[in-house]
Amino acid sequence: MAHILLRHRDIPDINKLEVYRKNGGFEAFKQVVTSMKPEAVTEVVKASGLRGRGGAGFPTGLKWAFMDNKNWPHYVVANADESEPGTFKDREIMENNPFQFLEGVAISAYAVGAHAAYVYLRGEFWQVAAFLDERIEDMEKAGLLGGKLFGTDYELKIYTHLGAGAYICGEETALLESMEGKRGQPRLRPPFPPSFGLYGKPTVVNNVETFTNIPMIFSKGADWYKALGTADSAGVKVFSLSGRVKKPGNYELPFGTTFRQLVYEHGGGIINDRPVKAIMAAGASSSIIKVDDKALDTPMDYASVRTLGADLGSASVIVIDDTVSIEWVISKTVEFFKHESCGKCTPCREGNYWMMHVIERMEAGEDVEANTELLLSVAKQMQNKCLCALGEFATMAVVSGIERFPDDFTTSSIGGGHA
Amino acid sequence: MPKQLVSLIIDGQSVSVPAGTLIVDAAKQVGIDIPVFCYHPKMEPVGMCRMCLVEVGRPVIDRVSGQPVIEGGKPKIQFGAKLETACTTPVSEDMQVVGMSEKARTGRKEIVEFLLTSHPLDCPVCDKGGECPLQNLTMAHGSSESRFKFDDKQHQKKHVPLGDLIWLDRERCIQCARCIRFQGEIVGDAVLDFFRRGRATDIVTYSEPGFDSIFSSNTTDICPVGALTTADFRFGARPWEMNSAASICTHCPVGCNTTLNIRREARSDGNMVIKRIMPRQNEQVNEIWLCDKGRFAHHFSASPDRLAKPLVRTGELVTESSWEEALNLAARSLVEAKQDFIVLAGGRLANEDLFNLKALADGLGGKAALYTHMGGGYLTTLAGVSMDTNFGEMGAGTSILVAASDLYNEAPLWYLRIKQAAARGATLILAGARETKLEKYAAHVIRYAYGDEAQTIKSMQKSKAGQAAAEALASAQNLVVLYGSDGLGLEGSASLAEACAGLLDMTGHAGKPGSGLIGVWPHANDQGAWEMGFQPVADLAAEFKNKLVYIAACDPVGDDPALAEALKSARFVIVQELFQTETTRLANVVLPAQAFTEREGSFTSGERRVQRFYPALPAFGETRPDFSITASLAQKAGLELEGTSALLIMNKIASKYKSFEGLSYARLAEVREQWPLVGRGDIYYGGAIYANTQGLGTRLALLEAGSLPGTKPVESKRPSESELLAIPVCKIYDRGVTVLPSTLLHPHIGDASVSLHPDTAVRFKVQAGSTAQLTVNGTAYQVKVLVDEKVPASVALLPRSMGIPINTPATISLKAA
Ligand SMILES: Cc1cc2nc3c(=O)[nH]c(=O)nc-3n(C[C@H](O)[C@H](O)[C@H](O)COP(=O)(O)O)c2cc1C
Ligand code: SF4
Ligand code: SF4
Ligand code: SF4
Ligand code: FES
C-alpha cells in the first residue's frame, strides 16, 4: 500500500515544494480556506476518528472543538519535541515530507481561527528547524503563508521555536511555558491548553505526526481514513521499531497490525534469531510487556495493547530478547527519568533520585532481594501522586519489570549481562 | 456581588463556602488542618509538594438527565481512584472530602518520607527549629525509621548568601517555590528563581546585587523550612527562648503591626535585647508582611550611643545630672520665658507625647510646632480617609491617585497594597516628575516638571494624559489620593495637598466614606500631630530667636547646620532625645527619652488608624517616656498634666479631639478573626507570622469637611542655565538616627550621592561613579555621582537624610572634585 505519511518513500523529492504540489499538495488547504467554515473543518477531523499521535491518543477533532471562542487570539502549536527514547518518527517526517506536515498545521490553524502557528522542536533538532525555516519561506514565497491566502481574508504565519534539551518540554504545558521563555515545567491542569494555552490564550497542541495526517483526510475523505485501522484506533501509525531486531526503523502500518507482524514481517525478526522476551511499546515510558504467543498476536491499537497491561503511547516499540536482563533495562529507564525529572513535584524529584541510588546498589550486587523490594515500594509510592505524567512514566518499567520478571532480580541474575 | 455558596462535607463536617474556594481553605474555615508546604493562602496554588493529598468524592451524574444520581435519598458519591491535592482543587456542590482516612494519611506519610530523603534534618542547629512546618509535619506524619540510606544524601552548600540580608541553606530547601512566588507574584521583584532541574534544583538570585528587593525578609517567614534565614537573626536565638510584645513599626506612615521578639542574653551583658521583629497580622494594614527596613532597622533602641542620663550645661561645660536638677533648671527657664517659648515636636513621638507637649504649649501660652518638611496635614484631618477605606479591599470601582510620591521608598507596604489593588481592578493614576517603580501598574501616568505639582493636579484635564486620568477620577465610586513630598518642601507640599483636596471636592468625593486624602509623611506619627493641631512653621530660625526652645524627637541642626546659629540665639534650649545629636550639643538641658520599645503608647498612621504599641524592654538607663518628661516639666512650671499613665492620656485625647471621640486603649486592643488564619499550631499554613491578639487599632472619625481652601499658587523654582536645581527625594535606607545604628543595612545606605541625567552630567563635567563637589547654601559637600536616564534633565536628585541638608528644592552648584 502506498504510504500516507511517509510518502517520501514512494515519491522522490517530495520535500521540494513543486514536487509536493504536483502531487496534490496544498489543494486540501486551499479547499478548506476557500470553501469551508472553520467549524466544518473540525467536524471532518472528528468524523475521521483521528487520535493524537503524541502518546495520549486523544481525539484530535474533539480537542479542536474545545477551543474557547470567547478568548482570542488562538494559537496552534506543533509538538516536535520528540524526546521519548525509541521514538524517531517525527524527525523522519519533518526532514522528508515537511510540506505535508506544515499543510496539516495550516489546516488546523484555519479550523481554530489561529493566525500564528508554532513548531516547537527539541534543541537537538536545530538542523531540522533550519530546514523547516527554509520550507516555510518557500511557502511564503508561493503565497501559501502570509496575508490574503487564496484571495480570502485569512492570514497565517508559521514559526519554528527551539527548546533547550529537556524531555519534559514534550509535555504540552511545559512546552508552552518553555515557549513563553519560562522554565520548562508542567502547569497544573485543568485548565487545558484549548482554554488556557500559549500566553494564556486558547491553543491547540498536536504532535507532528497527528498534523501530517490532516491533509490526506481532506483530500481522500474522513470515511476513507476511518476505514483504515481499527474501530478503536482509526488510520495508520508510524511505528518506530528498535531494540534487538534485525531491521530497526520506522514502519507506517495500519492500527491493528500485530506485534508479530511488526517484528517478524517488517523488522526481519530478532538478531541471531533469539526469542523475544519483552516489548516496550511506548519507549522508556512503557510498562514492559512479557511476551508470549498471545502478546505477539495482539493487534497494536490503543485498546488492545491495554489488555496486555501496557500502553501503545507514541508506538515506539523496543524489542528485548533473552540476552537482555530486565534489571538492566530498568536501570536505564530510571537513570533517564532521574535525569529528566523537572523537579517541580516531590514524589518524582525525590523518588527518581532514590530509585537511582537503590538501583546502583543492586547493580553492585548489594543485598539484591531487599533492594528490589525497596525499589518496587518506592516506585509504587510515587504512583498516583505526581503532578504530571512523567513521574508516573518513571514507575512503569520498574513496577512491571519487577513484577513480571522476578527472575531478573536475584543475586545470581544481577550482572547477568546484556547484549 | 456575593459569590454563590457551595455546600460540601469535609471529614464528616458540613461546610458552606463561596464557590471557587479551595478545599484546603474550606477545611481551614471549619478548623480542619490539611497539611501543606507549597500552598500559601496569599498566593496562587501550584500543587508542587503534593503534601495536601486527600480523598475526594463527587456526586455521580446521570449521563442522560445530567442530574445527580440519587441513592437512598442522597446523591450517590463516587470517590476517585487517586488522591487529589486539596490546595488546587476547588470545592463543588455535595463534594465529600476525606483527609483522615488510612489512604490519605498514608499518602502524606509517603510524601514526608520523600521530602526527608533530601533533607538534612539538622533541627538542633536550625534557626527554624521550634517553628518549622517540616519539623512539625515530620513529627505528625513521618516514620521513625529511615528507609533512605544516609550515604545517598546529597550534600550541598549550607551558607549561601542570596544577598547581604538573606542566607540560603541549600540542603534544607524543599523546592516549594514559596520564596520565588512571593517575590514574583506579591512583590513584583522577580529576583529569585530555580536553577537546574530534578533533584539538582536550586534557588538562585538573578539580580545584581543579589536578592535586590526591599521585601526580601518576608520569604524567611513563609519558607516552610530553615532554608532561608536573615543575616540579622540567624544563629541568634531559638524561638522558644524568646518572649514577644506587640508593637508598631515606626519607620514610615504605614504603621505595620509587628511583634518584637526579645530575650535576656549573656552575649548582651545580661540585658534584654530585641532579637528580631516579626510581622503581626493586620489585613487592613500590612497583611502578614513587613519591609526590610521595618524588620532590620531596630538596632537603634539598643545602641550604646543612647542617652542614659539628663545633661545640663554650665557655660561650655556639659555634665550629667539628676532628673530633679535638670527638670528644675528647665522649668525655671520655662517660667521665666513666660509666653516666649516654642515647642518643636518630631513625628516620631507617640500620640500621648504629642498631647502633653501641645497641652504644655497651650497651657503656658507658648507655641507648638511640628518639625517636618511636608505640609498640608490639616487637610488630611478634614478630608482624610476614615472607617470605610480599606487597602485590603480596594479594587474595581476605586481610583487611586498617587501624586509626588515614590511609595516603594517612602511607604513600602502601601506600594504593595496599591499594586495589589490595581491587580484587583482599581484604577491607578500616578502623577510624578520622574519614573517610579509603581508606575508599572498604573493605568495613567501624568508627567510634570518639578515645581508644577499643584498646578498639574489642578489643571489635569488640560493635558491629554491628564484628561483620561481625570475622567477615571471623576467616574470612580471611591477616590483615594495619596500625596507625598518627592521634590517638595513645606510650601510646595502644602499647595499640592490643597490641589488634591480640591480634586476630591470637585469630583464629589470629599467626605465620602471610602474616599479621602492620605499624606505620605516622613514619620510614623506625623498624622497624629496634625490631628492634635500641630502645624509646621515656615521660618524656624526666626522662631528660635530670643525664645526658649523645647525640642522633642527631632534634630533640626543635624538636618540643617545653618540652624545652629539660630539656635544659639535662643534664650534657652531644652532637648528631649534618644541620642546625642547636633541639636542636643547646643542644648542647655538634655532630657533622655525612652524608645518606643520600652514603654507604651499609640501612633496614628497615615491612613488615620490609631494603633497601640506595648513595652517590650526595660527602660534604658534612667530614661523616661516623653509624655512623662513633659508632664514633670509642666508640673514644675505650675501646670498639671497626666504623666504616669498613657492610657489616661488617651482618654483625655478622646475627650478633647473630635476625631478621637470614643477611642480608648480597650478599643484599640480589640481584635476580630482575620483571614487567612495564621500564627497557630498549624504554622505550615501561613508561616511564622504572629497572629494579632493585641489589637487591630481603630480609624479616626471623619471631620466635617466644610469648605476646603483653594490652592495658592507657588512659584516654581526654575534654575538658570548655569545653575542646577537640587530635588529632595526619599531613599528607603538613609542615615536617619533610627536607621544608621543597624550596621547590617550600611551596604544599602551607601554614601551621599546625587543622581543626574546623563546630559546634565556632561553639562557639569562630572562622571558616573566619580566624586563631585556640591555646594548648597554656601556649604560644600563631597557626593558620589550617579547617572540615570530616568532623572529629568537639569535637576539633581538629592536623597534626604544622607548628610546633605535639603528639605526643599534649592539651587546648587556642582563640579568635579
Ligand atoms: C513527559 C511527557 C513527554 C511528552 N513528550 C512528547 C513529545 O515529545 N512529543 C509529543 O508529541 N507529545 C509528547 N507528550 C504528549 C503531549 O503532552 C501532548 O499530549 C501531545 O503533544 C498532544 O498531541 P496529540 O494529541 O497530537 O498527541 C509528552 C507527554 C509527557 C507527559
Ligand atoms: S512528575 Fe516529574 S516531571 Fe512532572 S512535574 Fe513532577 S517533577 Fe516535574
Ligand atoms: S528556600 Fe524555602 S521557600 Fe524557597 S523554595 Fe526552598 S523551601 Fe521553599
Ligand atoms: S512599610 Fe513602613 S511601617 Fe511597614 S515595615 Fe516598612 S517602614 Fe515599617
Ligand atoms: S501540593 Fe498542595 S500544598 Fe503543595
Image: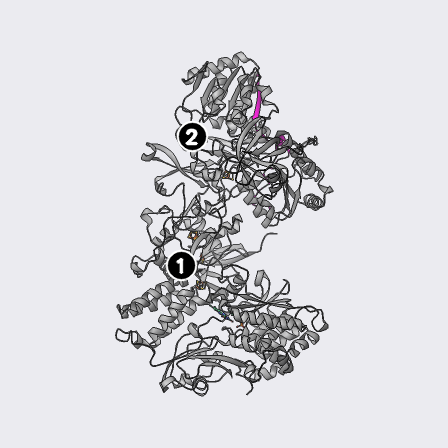
Residue, x 59% and y 50% (percent of image)?
B424
Would residue A39 be found to the left or right of residue B576 on screen? right
Would residue B639 be found to the left or right of residue B598 on screen? right
Q: Residue B332, image x and y in percent?
A: 49, 13
- Whether the magenta-drawn stretch holds residue B2 is answered as no
Indicate which label's residue lies in the foreground, 2 or 1: 1
Q: Amino acid at mark 1?
A: Ala
The crowding category of the residue bearing disc 2, from other C-alpha atoms within 10 Å (few below 14, some 14 to 19, many at least 20), is: some
Answer with the quadrant where ligand 5 appears in the image: bottom left
Q: CA distance from mark 2 to mark 1?
A: 48 Å
Q: Amino acid at mark 2?
A: Glu
Protein chain holding label 2: B
Q: Residue B642, image x and y in percent?
A: 49, 22
Protein chain holding label 1: B
Q: Main secondary structure of the magenta part?
A: loop
Q: Earlier in the sequence, mark 2 or mark 1?
A: 1
Q: Residue B518, image x and y in percent?
A: 60, 37
- Whether the magenta-drawn stretch holds residue B371 is answered as yes
Residue under disc 2 on the same chain as residue under disc 1:
yes
Provide the secondary structure element on which disc 2 rests: helix
The foreground one among B766 and B472 is: B766
Q: Which residue is mark 1?
A: B200
Look at the image and tell me in which quarter the C terminus of chain B lies: top right
Would residue A177 be found to the left or right of residue B592 on screen? right
Q: Which residue is mark 2?
A: B598
In the image, the segment drawn in magenta is B365-394
